[in-house]
Amino acid sequence: MTLHLPTLLRWLARVALGCALGFALLVVAVAASRASLRTPDPTLLLIDRHGAFLGEVGAEEDAPLGYWPVDPMPWRVVSATLALEDRRFWTHPGVDPRAVARAVSQNMKEGGVVSGASTLAMQVARMQDPGPRTYGRKAVEATTALMLTARYGREEVLRHYLRLVPYGNRIRGIGYAARRYLDKPVQDLSWAETAFLCALPQAPSRTNPFDPEGRKRAVSRAHRILDALHAEGLLDDAELELARVELEALRIPERGERPVTALHAVLRMEESLAAEPLDGPVLQGDPRVTLTLDLGMQEDLTAIVGRRVRGWAARGVGQAAVMVVDRATGEVLAAVSSVDYFDEQASGAIDYARVERLPGSTLKPFLYALALERGVLTPGTVLDDLGRGPEGIRNADNRYLGPMLPRVALGNSRNVPAVRLLDAIGVDAGYSLFRELGLHDDAEPASHYGLGLAIGGMPLTLEHLVQGYTALADDGRWRELAWVQGAPQAERQLFTPETARVVTGWLSDPLARLPSFSRMGFSEYPFPVAVKTGTSAQYRDAWAVAYSERYIVGAWVGHPDYLPMKQMSGFRAGARLVQEVMTHLHADELDGLTDLGFPSPEAAAPYRICALSGQRATDACDRVFTEHFTPGTEPVEDCPVHRRVWVDARNGLLASNATPERFRRERVFAALDPRYADWAERAHLPRAPETLSMLGDDDAPVMLSDLTPLTPTGRVALPGADTPPSLRVTAPSDGVKLIRDPEIPAPQATLALRAAVDPPVEQVVWYVDGEPFIVADYPYTARWPLTPGTHRIEARLPFTTLASEAVVVEVR
């Protein structure tokens, strides 16, 4: 079949028209799918409290940074951008016909592409959906530009352009460019600075401000922009001259490098800010995030921690972490989370401030505060440190210090009084307090830890521990730690100010730490500091938390693989590290002139009380503390323990009316409750004599019927002379169940037997299962070899029917 030429031409025309229509429909369809203003989430620029660069959050590796909103749009930026990129922006619909005609003419004349006709709207379309520059893509961009302008309006398209346009060095948007290159908000740009930044997008790689040659090219182009602005009447002669001078003097800050010392903090913020909306309460619409960190302090403390860890390596120390918090605001000023971030052997990339470890004794102050709040104890309550406590818990040093005031029990970090205190308060109540302090999230029930809560049986992080101490450091008000300035913080009053100040006074008293911790050691300062240390089993973790009038400092020292250290306790390692940090922070107070102590409780009155009785001290008391009592809790009696007794210097017995004056001596003895007899004997406390001296003048014997004992006032007394003794078994506890370790040799598998007798006697007889076991002299302590079965144990007075209540023990 032969086609005539006219027919062929008509057919080709229809085909061409169909193709053109199809192409047009495709272009419109593609453009319609892209005709929305889109942008990645803005990059968060992290800076420290003084404006130092810390890092950028929100972009993938090597991805563009920035995309900051520009609202409102500065008129200088708008004027310079339009003068350079799109002079008829306010009049065309998104595509400039005159520019298109000019570009087509020039390209046809030159036989290639030498001129473009892209408007700002078309550039927005291209930046949102980049690709190769073909005529088809150009048509899609033009159509998209028309749709964007019609849909959003010119002003919104311009605003979006200023948010997307590239400025080199992965920076997108003039808002972010102003911050990274000039360290100022875009609204504050001068004409010179505006021209300089507007010179960058045309060829970002050739006008790199961090490169000297690139900066020269950018300045040269900026001069041309200023000339164009002057020609359009946007700058007068004076403004032009000023801008030229300023442009030549423009200095670009050094490229900010993410400091290695703050990597953990930056990564932490990247994690916590990932879900924060820009207009939320934390960011408050500003992608420039000012952290509470002080980079200078961070770097100083990193050096201190690193030096200590390396110096302790031979003792098994492998890592450490330190946090410093502003006591008044709860702002985190420094967080050294590890040593040597890039050291794989030391596992330096782990954030040890957020790793759960066993905190040792660092939780005890909270239990004492809770006991004060609930009236379980007062500052004058005497606590017993007399052998193992409930659940067999013992003191870390295997020593027992007898009767103790809460101040001394806490200062010496005794386990047994703390466990008994938690037992009195209730494990559930203690666990609930720890939840309120932010130390746990109820992942386990209180029974999972039991009384071990009192001695650090619940793992927690250094960050949570330091946060918990805000409740003691700030008059009982717990405060959530702040990492971002101006971010909201949760707060709640957990203790009364009086309770918090009382506990603070205990923790800051170096005398209260005797005898367990020596004076002038790692927990003592020339200015007021409250300190608490903690050590986990086998020295796997060493902790210390301290607070001054200005700072709360917490430290953890240990090994990344949970290996035991060599005698590196909370005192030797944790307190030493905290002391070095704290003295560095208080370098202006090392002369001791500010060591005035923490404020006293306002609603409490001071009383001098005896360390053994907790009652008002007399001149006979040898160890006295000043404690503050709230109304209704103050002591009302004088100390009944310390007694002045007249003795005969010749034999140490009670002096009588027949003792010559020259042999009478007044001595002080401690008349303790009988339950302390065993401890007093081991502590070598002298017992008051109970027998009258029979010596008269010239050592001649005197008839007993003619004698009366002397007291300091001349009165006579024979305490308990006619009172029948009462007996009580103090150890073991009734109902205790024991498991005998078969690997322990039989002679060593024994159980301590202790009794209290009031008034004291010379001997008791221990009975087991109704049979005499052993006669024990004062203070009546004995050891019974463990024998499988259920046994009844009691103490009896020799040759009498007086006996204690029996206790039952079960041995397996």
Image (cartoon, rainbow, N blue to C red):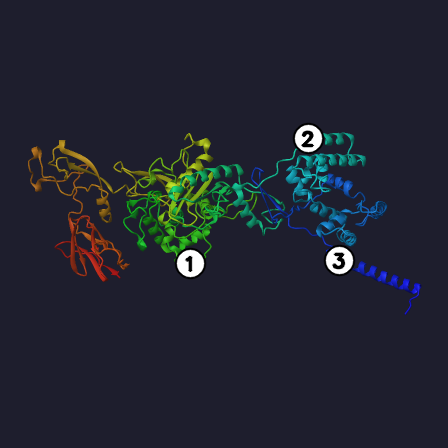
Judge whether residue 298 can be spotted in this image.
Answer: yes
* Residue under pointer 3: 30
Mark 3 crowdedness (10 Å alpha carbons): few <14, some 14-19, many ≥20: some
Q: Earlier in the sequence, mark 3 or mark 2?
A: 3
Picture quadrant where residue 638 is located: top left
* Residue under pointer 2: 249
* Of the two numbered discs 2 and 1 in the rendering, the one whose residue sits closer to the viewer: 2
Q: How far apart are marks 2 and 1 (CA)?
A: 67 Å
The quadrant the C terminus occupies is: bottom left
Disc 3 is placed on an element classified as: helix
* Residue under pointer 1: 445
Horizontal and vertical percent position of residue 503: 39, 43
Q: Give yes or no for contact between labels 3 and 1 (Cβ–Cβ under 8 Å).
A: no
Q: Which of marks 3 and 1 is nearer the N terminus?
A: 3
Judge whether residue 629 can be spotted in this image.
Answer: no
- Callout 3, which amino acid? Val
Mark 1 crowdedness (10 Å alpha carbons): few <14, some 14-19, many ≥20: few
- Callout 2, which amino acid? Ala
- Callout 1, which amino acid? Pro
